[in-house]
Amino acid sequence: MPTMTAAQQREQAKVAYDAFLAGCPSRQLLDRLSDKWVALVLAALAEQGTMRYSELARRLAGVSQKMLTQTLRTLERDGLLIREVTPTVPVTVDYTLTPLGSSLDGVMRQVKAWAELHMDDVRSAREEYDAR
Amino acid sequence: MPTMTAAQQREQAKVAYDAFLAGCPSRQLLDRLSDKWVALVLAALAEQGTMRYSELARRLAGVSQKMLTQTLRTLERDGLLIREVTPTVPVTVDYTLTPLGSSLDGVMRQVKAWAELHMDDVRSAREEYDAR
DNA sequence: GTGCCTACTTACCAATGGAGAGTTACCCCG
DNA sequence: CGGGGTAACTCTCCATTGGTAAGTAGGCAC
């Protein structure tokens, strides 16, 4: 059986992986940042201060209501923003970054800065690669 | 039709979104980083220098072969790493970060540092939220 | 009442990612 | 000369994720 060794490797890998995950906070954060809307919500709120649900929906054009609600909930759960319901005529909901949230935004802004600096390099690398 | 206004908003949003996307490099990079394995490949290569395919597979335990190959290819295409085939007995393939790749890793390392600093806060926020 | 507004929730469906087996290409051992 | 072993994929199927669109609550304006 030619794939047996590979399967064994895979299994060993999984044990090591689980052990690694348990103690590795950066891995958990990466999973959170893998959600592409997170960074955009952080950026929007850092820019505007407090925003309403509908404002966010307009700003993050292209996001579905479902995903917006979902990411806002997980960010609230993680203590990165506060959700405040005001029982006005039609109920309005305001979202604001916590200090923790804005500190994460500070880091993400550096990633954004890198992108703006180097995206041309990436683009030309792509063209060269595609040309081959 | 109650959703008509929402649908219209959605459509307007999409136009604005496309226009925004065209000129916004940070958005393109975010899409790249959304692929959670990218950061891990960068970290592994930054740590070890050059690595072979099988070494990477072992280091990034939990990654499927399919995704590893896929992310390596896109990173190569974007000029972040170099792929070098050596025609040894069974062919071996070495991957090395380019200067561009290691500069991105530098940024990502700050994200990792943030995670290590603040993950406890996030964890306690989660517990508090779940307790309600 | 009828309709409309905000902020969701739900149902369905297409696309993405993972698991695992199969493939290629080569050499060495018997 | 044929079987076996190995590295790096590649393919196929299935589960999870995300998007789309429609529905809900509940108060107010008409």
Image (cartoon, coloured by chain):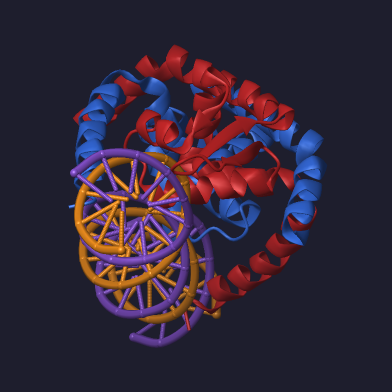
Chain colours: A blue, B red, C purple, D orange
The image shows residue A4 at horizontal and vertical percentages of 19, 46
Direction from residue A123 to residue B45 in the image, left or right: left
The answer to whether residue B103 is seen in the rendering is yes
Res. B59 image quadrant: top left
Give the camera-side residue of B96 and B104: B96
Res. B81 image quadrant: top right
B111 vs A94: above or below:
above
C20 vs D28: above or below:
above
Residue occupying the point 65% across, 65% down: B13
Give the camera-side residue of A128 and B110: A128
A89 vs D20: above or below:
above
The image shows residue B77 at horizontal and vertical percentages of 67, 49
Residue occupying the point 78% across, 36% down: A118
Give the camera-side residue of C13 and D5: D5
The answer to whether residue B132 is seen in the rendering is no
Res. B105 image quadrant: top right
The image shows residue D22 at horizontal and vertical percentages of 38, 81
Residue occupying the point 48% across, 84% down: B1
The image shows residue A7 at horizontal and vertical percentages of 21, 44
Most distant residue in the top direction: B117
Direction from residue D6 to residue B96 in the image, left or right: right
Number of numbered discs: 0
Q: Quadrant of the C terminus of chain A?
A: bottom right
Residue occupying the point 41% across, 52% down: B66
